Image (cartoon, rainbow, N blue to C red):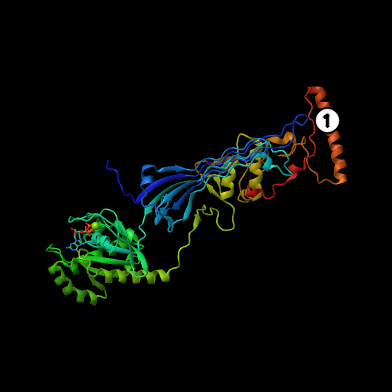
Amino acid sequence: MAVPSFVDKVTLHVAGGSGGDGVASVHREKFKPLGGPDGGNGGNGGSVILAVGADVTTLIDYHHEPHRRGTNGAPGAGSNRSGSNGEDLVLRVPDGTVVRDESGEVLADLIGPGTELVIAAGGRGGLGNAALASSKRKAPGFALKGEPGDERTITLELKVVADIGLIGFPSAGKSSLIASLSRARPKIADYPFTTLAPNLGVVTAGSTTFTVADVPGLIEGASEGRGLGHDFLRHVERCAALVHVIDCATVDPGRDPLTDLDVIEAELKAYSEATGSDLLDRPRLVALNKTDVPDAKQIAEFVRPELEERGLDVYEVSAASHAGLRELSFAMAEIVASRRAATPVAEVTRIVLRPKAEAGVGREFTITQVNGQWVVRGEKPRRWVRQTDFSNDEAVGFLADRLNRLGVEDELLKLGAAAGDDVVIGDEADAVVFDFDPQITAGAEVLGRRGEDLRIDQSDRRTNVQRREELAARRAFEAEQREARSQTREPDWSFPEDDPALDGDLGDEDKI
Ligand SMILES: Nc1nc2c(ncn2[C@@H]2O[C@H](COP(=O)(O)OP(=O)(O)OP(=O)(O)O)[C@@H](O)[C@H]2O)c(=O)[nH]1
Ligand SMILES: [Mg+2]
């Protein structure tokens, strides 16, 4: 298989790294075996970022390695140690790269060195049980799992960001013109389709510096795939103006400058219609080329008036002798300068793709009935499900609490859900099905309410009345324990000292 040297379209599979899991751990010291939760948070997964690099000209690297992912976040550890964050993976792309999703929709148009796009965000690390503790839930016996990173399949498409585009039949002298106007040295030869990928040259005329690109030659029927087809025209879509390069020295009997121009215009029209491009709106210049050849000079002089009658700006030039090139380059510069003056300079931007609001404006979730199941959709429910360790009853109970606080249970009841109905939450791939149980209970009842552990009591904001009540409750509890011990010979549970550090309420838990 031939190895392509110029790649202007690639499909790429990108995935952010997974977030590390939070950890559930209890601080232990001599004489203080239950010193409170101290499980650290998992680190965030690294994101995949596309960044425009000034010196990158092709997408070839991605053609060879189409699967890219950010590194995973590390899990948390005991003693409040957080896991380290995964590293971002920065993929450098050429200026003018268009990013599309699988359906072909444009996600971003990356223009200007430094412009970045977070294409696949890393998953968030899960909170450890230390961070999940609150005044109501003093000793969570669970932690949240890290979330998986975003995954996407995208196509990157290179659009040369040139100010002026040269178009014309094969061998009209487009590449020769670039070579004569700039320091670029594209391949030039007297056979058609010498140019297989656009060439770019930098031209200075007066105080304006601009770029000129050629595209592979067009022939009649290019829009139907003849020759090299017309796909390459996308490279001149961003140009400020198009220059028709017309070969006045062709000996082909079927051709003359006017028909050549008509043929190319018809192909531009077919391209615009097929792609919805606004290419036809670009101003046009005409470069009648090869006027160093005597016959060609005559033909150029002959057709000039008719072209001008059509409202076109005409230049008689020779890429070989450089005749007329100065005038042509100044005409190009004028169009470029006026277009630049009219468009504000694009600022270097960082674009972050956010998932579209699934539930609609002002709603956190929607519930629909599909095949007899209740399907709950929404960013928060989806994330919360992914954070849940379903092997831990307390964690499942925490999820149920979160969903209830969001109003999912109320809404289900309102819609007529009955106990025992299937409730589906999450993405199709990792959806979770619950039995609807309006008073869902968690597994930690033995220890009091979910997340509360009578053995650990850290509140330092008690009134005296509360203190007395608590003391009485504690005594009663101790008595109960003694009673139980005398029957079962269980080991002693000592009470940890009050630890004000543990009294931080998590506040808005929806932010987890
Ligand atoms: N005499 C003369 N020959 C020219 C001039 N410009 C280009 N040529 C010749 O025309 C032939 C084709 O030139 P290219 O620059 O490769 O043409 P192109 O339009 O880039 O052709 P493709 O890449 O095949 O589409 C070459 O043999 C050039 O030397 C000119 O101004 N005068
Ligand atoms: Mg060429």
Tell me the quarter of the image containing the N terminus. top left
Q: In x, y percent, where is residue 63?
A: 36, 45
Q: Which residue is mark 1?
A: 480
Which corner quadrant of the image does residue 494 belong to?
Answer: top right
Which corner quadrant of the image does residue 243 belong to?
Answer: bottom left
Q: What kind of residue is marked 1?
A: Glu
Q: In x, y percent, where is residue 344?
A: 45, 67
Classed neighbour count for the residue bearing mark 1: other residues with Cα under 10 Å, few (<14), some (14–19), many (≥20): few
Taking the image as shown, residue 71 lies to the left or right of residue 164, namely right
Instruction: Please name whichever residue, 354 or 76, is drawn nearer the observer in this view of the structure.
Output: 76
Taking the image as shown, residue 12 lies to the left or right of residue 17, namely left
Ligand 1 quadrant assignment: bottom left
Residue at 81%, 29% (x, y): give it.
Answer: 481
The answer to whether 9 is drawn above or below residue 268 in the figure is above
Quick check: can you spot residue 422?
no
Which corner quadrant of the image does residue 286 belong to?
Answer: bottom left
Residue at 72%, 44% (x, y): give it.
Answer: 134
Q: Looking at the image, how many numbered discs can be counted on the residues?
A: 1
Q: What kind of element bears circle 1?
A: helix
Residue at 78%, 23% (x, y): give it.
Answer: 488
The answer to whether 113 is drawn above or below residue 374 in the figure is below
Quick check: can you spot residue 298?
yes
Q: In x, y percent, where is residue 445?
A: 72, 36
Taking the image as shown, residue 487 lies to the left or right of residue 355, namely right
Instruction: Please name whichever residue, 187 or 364, is drawn nearer the observer in this view of the structure.
Output: 187
The answer to whether 212 is drawn above or below residue 140 in the figure is below
Q: In x, y percent, where is residue 419?
A: 63, 42
Instruction: Please name whichever residue, 114 or 459, is drawn nearer the observer in this view of the structure.
Output: 114
